[in-house]
Amino acid sequence: MHGVWAGNLAPTQPEIATPPPNISSMLMDLLRNMFPDNIVKIFLSSVNTVSTLRGNSSSQSLQDVPGVNIIGLLITSLVIGIAAGAESVQGDDLIVRFFTAAAKVLTRILEKVMWFLPIGVGSLVLRAISNINGADGTARALAMFVVTSFAYLGVITLVLLPTIYLIFVRRDFCKFLGLVIRPMLTAFSTLSSIAALPGVFKVCEQLGMNVQTAQLLGPFLTSFNANGSSAFIASSIIFCAQWAGHTISIGSIIAIFFLTGLNVMALPAVPSASIILVILLVRSFRIPDTAIPFLFVTDFIIDALRTPTNVLSHTTCLLIVDRFEKRRELPTSRSEVSSIGETSPSNDPKTGDNPMVI
């Protein structure tokens, strides 16, 4: 009776191991969750690929993981919003009244929920602290995370952006920093890059940039350009992996950087919006989210520094665009001057140098 235990007539199964997920399966899971086959299902579960290793052979299967499919919810809401904003639909009063009423109801609910937000965040932090053994190690890990965040934000602000400014704009960076420091302080106090846009427009006007161009590109940059936020999201994902003892490869780190840069373009310019993307990408890479509550503790401090970094990046990009725009207009103005000179009366061989001859 080899392989049969007393009281159990089923033969023993060989040990089943679960290999770590590869990058291709992660990307495919991300695409499946972005475009779900069932709209109702996005509120209940998300799809993950599970790899099972039996001996020398492995097999993959799709598994529903309980929880809200955040990225599917975002994509579905985006598609519905674009469709509802079409000209052929805007004339329908029923749809307009429905979404207007839904927006009012959700806004009222959020206003009430926000009063309990400190209690909820505090409960998450206390629950996470109660599950750890050493408080000293936790405090040390959080301190190192904050110091690391200060380090890469300092590199972006004091090294990367000044270098880009000097290469493309070719002006005095100290003068530029003296002007842009006011909108950076606004972003520091409000934790929102949108609130600093009027100050950014004023700085661009003082530096000789076309205000209309700045007003056109400024709102786009607040959505598509967030260097400080993308660095924070990538470092937070790696912090969560290290906290849970989850091993990540070099390929996974590259995929984290790529997906962070891709998803940060949809990041709203509101306080603590980066945490949502951290949760989304942590689940996409199947990293345990046990360290997420600790990010709420440090997010206020780091957000107060990464938002001014984003504002400095926005202003730098606006001046770079203005530099290339003026360079493009310069040959056009030269050609106009040359064409005027060729058609002037003094160069006409029939009239000679006398401007009075008609």
Image: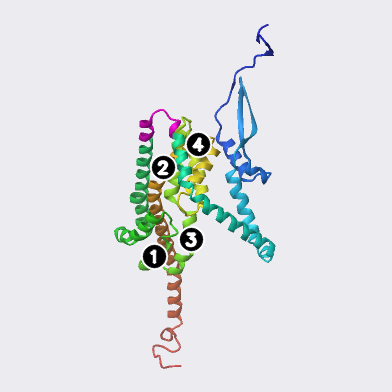
Residue 345, quarter of picture: bottom left
Do tag 3 and tag 2 residues touch (Cβ < 8 Å)? no
Residue 34: mark: none
Q: Which residue is mark 1?
A: 204
Q: Which residues are magenta?
A: 129-140
Among numbered discs 1 and 2, the one appearing first in the sequence: 1
Q: Position of residue 177 (x, y in %)?
A: 32, 58
SS category of the residue bearing label 3: helix
Q: Which residue is mark 2?
A: 297
Q: Residues within 10 Å of mark 1 (few under 14, many from 20)?
A: many
Q: Say which of marks 4 and 3 sits in front.
A: 4
Distance from label 3 to label 2 (Cα)? 29 Å
Q: Which residue is mark 3?
A: 219
Distance from label 1 to label 3 (Cα)? 14 Å
Q: Which residue is mark 4?
A: 289
Can residue 6 be seen by looking at this rendering? yes
Q: Is residue 103 left or right of residue 122?
A: right
Q: Position of residue 244 (x, y in %)?
A: 47, 31
Query: What residue type is disc 1 on?
Result: Cys
